[in-house]
């Protein structure tokens, strides 16, 4: 749940940032606004906020100093390490086998008939339990595979996370000892890491809680709300930019 909340926070930051980028510059084509500098500052702040959201979601301290599975962080990389601890995955599969609470047997007459129905329902229930075990196992494997891509040299995932992490640690943390990061995060890094965070949250929810926590509806609601906000901002900027407006 903590990881899900962090992902939702990132989704909202992304929705506001992207909607404003999609709506306001295009709507202001041919018009001049004295508030351009402030708009750029707001957009930059949103990009920084999203970068920090993602750095938190994929946070990991030096695993040499402290093993990943012992770090107190609700992050994708720590959860992946926990999934790899002996006994954790098998315990979650045992929990998954209890997702089925039992199949109610309809009332009927005749002892023999009741026994046959009970045997059939038991068989159905066992099949569901096996399927739920397999579903849990697949979700764990998918989650771990996704997390492992972040550590593979040469992948765009590792490069993106490296830029975001360096920016958070060396620039925003304001270290005077470490040199400034050589490469700043890119918008493509933020998009890529957010997509990975959404997938990771979905796999984790299925593995641990047994439900598909696809937050596409949540993302759509945030996008629609952001579009309403951007429309209001655009309307105000266009009004101020109108030379006939006495406030211009």
Image (cartoon, rainbow, N blue to C red):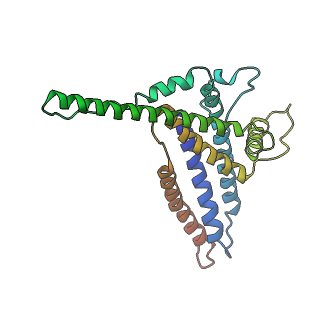
Q: Residue furthest front?
A: 112
Q: Is the residue 234 above or below the residue 100 in the image?
A: below
Q: Residue at x 45, y 34 (%)?
A: 132
How many discs mark residues in the rendered view?
A: 0
| Front residue (pair 244, 91) | 91
Q: Residue furthest left?
A: 109
- Tell me if 48 is positioned left or right of 96 in this view: right
Q: Residue at x 62, y 22 (%)?
A: 85
Q: Is the residue 92 above or below the residue 56 in the image?
A: above
Q: Residue furthest bottom?
A: 244
Q: Residue at x 19, y 32 (%)?
A: 113
- Tell me if 201 is positioned left or right of 107 in this view: right
Percent position of residue 93, x then y: 50, 27
| Front residue (pair 222, 124) | 124
Query: Image quadrant for the C terminus?
Result: bottom right
Percent position of residue 155, x then y: 77, 44
Percent position of residue 178, x then y: 85, 33
- Tell me if 44 is positioned left or right of 208 in this view: right
Percent position of residue 223, x then y: 53, 56
Q: Is the residue 48 above or below the residue 210 in the image?
A: below
| Front residue (pair 126, 170) | 126
Q: Residue at x 16, y 27 (%)?
A: 111
Q: Is residue 247 visible?
A: no
Q: Quadrant of residue 63?
A: top right
Q: Is residue 157 visible?
A: yes
| Front residue (pair 72, 231) | 72
């Amino acid at each position: 749940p903590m990881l899900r909340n962090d992902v939702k926070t990132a989704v909202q930051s992304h929705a506001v940032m992207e909607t404003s980028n999609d709506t306001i510059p295009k709507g202001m084509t041919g018009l001049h606004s004295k508030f351009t500098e402030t708009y750029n500052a707001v957009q930059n702040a949103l990009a920084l906020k999203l970068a920090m959201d993602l750095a938190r979601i994929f946070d990991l301290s030096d695993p040499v100093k402290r093993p990943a599975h012992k770090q107190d962080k609700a992050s994708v990389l720590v959860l992946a390490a926990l999934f790899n601890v002996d006994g954790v995955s098998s315990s979650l599969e045992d929990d998954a086998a209890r997702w089925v609470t039992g199949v109610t047997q309809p009332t009927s007459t005749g002892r023999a008939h009741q026994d046959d129905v009970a045997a059939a329902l038991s068989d159905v229930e066992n099949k569901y339990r096996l399927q739920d075990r397999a579903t849990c196992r697949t979700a764990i494997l998918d989650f771990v595979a996704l997390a492992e891509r972040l550590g593979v040299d040469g992948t765009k995932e590792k490069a993106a996370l490296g830029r975001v992490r360096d920016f958070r640690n060396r620039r925003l943390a304001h270290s005077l000892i470490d040199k400034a990061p050589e490469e700043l995060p890119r918008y493509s890094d933020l998009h890529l890491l957010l997509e990975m965070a959404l997938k990771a949250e979905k796999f984790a929810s299925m593995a641990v809680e047994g439900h598909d926590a696809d937050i596409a509806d949540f993302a759509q609601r945030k996008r629609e709300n952001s579009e309403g906000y951007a429309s209001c901002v655009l309307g105000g900027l266009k009004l101020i930019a109108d030379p006939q407006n006495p406030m211009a």
